[in-house]
């Protein structure tokens, strides 16, 4: 299923995009698309049955804002340098273990919302990424297979990053990852049953219409199941938590000088097969 949240910021309602591409209202069945829903197989079954029956009301999509497809996110966990190609383009050795950082849930915005370039920023960068949404509480998992079994769904993410803040200002990566609006999510959450293999997905990103990233999740150093298993030994993952699994080659930081970092007025579009497409206009904060 393709699950969405639509409407004004803070007043999103749950919705579903059916197999014919029609937007359907879920607010008569559920209150939100969140961890509680993903963890409840009975409710998910009712939603599927209602979708198959065609009984869900149609939502007019014209002029309707699409919000982030997951509400009440507990935490967003980032995985750094998780593609062989990305590590090579910046001259880094592939890590022996996953590199972790955290993004605050309040950085999450809708897929087409405006993204703000921080004041004083000269190195705001793009990162097209596969997002993993946890569907069952995960702690001390024993295998990658168990890791995949705890995934509730997948989302498209742009892990916007300010490289000077991240790398040159001391401390942790979090400085460059947590600026306002830095985690566009969506447009929809695709339930895990519709993604039999998350390691075969094409990942693309354009800046002002020019293709910048053209990768595939097969290039991940640590695949999705392994990442979930690994994280579960350092933190408990709860339904609705989001894991941002790394970006393929093609970011501004990996380009020759002068590196084409983002400026006000730039438009970024992101796409992963099956997970839809985003479009963000960048403006000054």
Image (cartoon, helix red, strand yellow):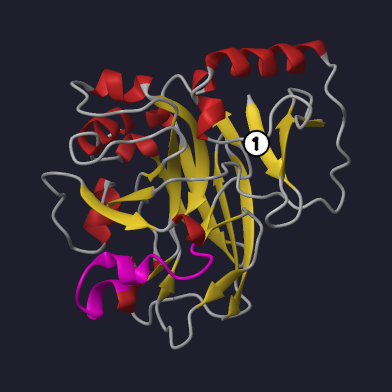
User: Which residue is depicted at the point 65% across and 32% down?
Assistant: 3
Give the side of residue 24 with respect to residue 126, left or right: right
Q: For residue 12, say whether it is visible.
A: yes
Could you tell me which quadrant the C terminus lies in? bottom right
In the shown orientation, is residue 216 left or right of residue 8? left
Tell which of 193 and 174 is nearer to you: 174
Residue extending farthest bottom: 120
Quarter holding the N terminus is top right
Res 29 → quadrant: top right
Range shown magenta: 166-182
Residue at the spot x=54%, y=80% of the render? Answer: 263
The picture places residue 87, in percent across and down from the top left corner, at: 23, 55
Can the viewer see residue 256 in this picture?
Answer: no
> Is residue 141 on the magenta stretch?
no
10 Å crowding of disc 1: few (<14), some (14-19), many (20+):
many
- Which image quadrant for residue 21? top right
x then y, percent, for residue 26: 75, 29
Mark 1: secondary structure: loop
Q: Residue furthest left?
A: 96
The residue identified by callout 1 is: 32
Percent x, y of residue 222? 24, 37
Q: Nearer the viewer, residue 130 or 177?
A: 177
At x 23% / y 67%, what residue is drawn?
172
Q: Nearer the viewer, residue 104 or 88?
A: 104
């Amino acid at each position: 299923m393709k699950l969405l949240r639509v409407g004004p910021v803070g007043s999103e309602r749950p919705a579903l995009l059916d197999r014919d591409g029609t937007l359907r209202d879920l607010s008569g069945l559920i209150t939100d698309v969140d961890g509680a829903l993903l963890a409840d197989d009975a409710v998910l079954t009712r939603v599927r049955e209602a979708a198959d029956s065609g009984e869900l009301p149609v939502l007019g999509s014209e002029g309707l804002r699409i919000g982030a497809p997951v509400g009440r996110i507990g935490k967003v966990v980032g995985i750094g340098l998780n593609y062989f190609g990305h590590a090579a383009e910046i001259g880094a050795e592939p890590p022996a273990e996953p590199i972790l950082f955290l993004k605050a849930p309040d950085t999450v915005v809708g897929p087409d919302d405006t993204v703000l370039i921080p004041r004083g920023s000269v190195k705001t960068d793009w990162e097209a990424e596969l997002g993993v949404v946890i569907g069952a509480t995960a702690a001390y998992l024993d295998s990658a297979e168990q890791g995949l079994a705890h995934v509730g769904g997948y989302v498209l993410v742009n892990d916007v990053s300010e490289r000077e803040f991240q790398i040159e200002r001391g401390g942790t990566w979090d400085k460059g990852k947590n600026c306002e609006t830095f985690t566009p999510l969506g447009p929809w959450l695709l339930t895990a049953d519709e993604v039999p293999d998350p390691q075969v997905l094409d990942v693309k990103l354009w800046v002002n219409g020019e293709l910048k990233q053209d990768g595939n999740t097969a290039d991940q150093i640590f695949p999705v199941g392994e990442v979930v298993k690994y994280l579960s030994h350092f933190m408990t993952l709860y339904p609705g938590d989001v894991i941002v699994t790394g970006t393929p080659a093609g970011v501004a930081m990996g380009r020759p000088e002068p590196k084409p970092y983002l400026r006000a007025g730039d438009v970024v579009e992101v796409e992963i097969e099956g997970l839809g497409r985003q479009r963000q206009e960048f403006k000054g904060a």
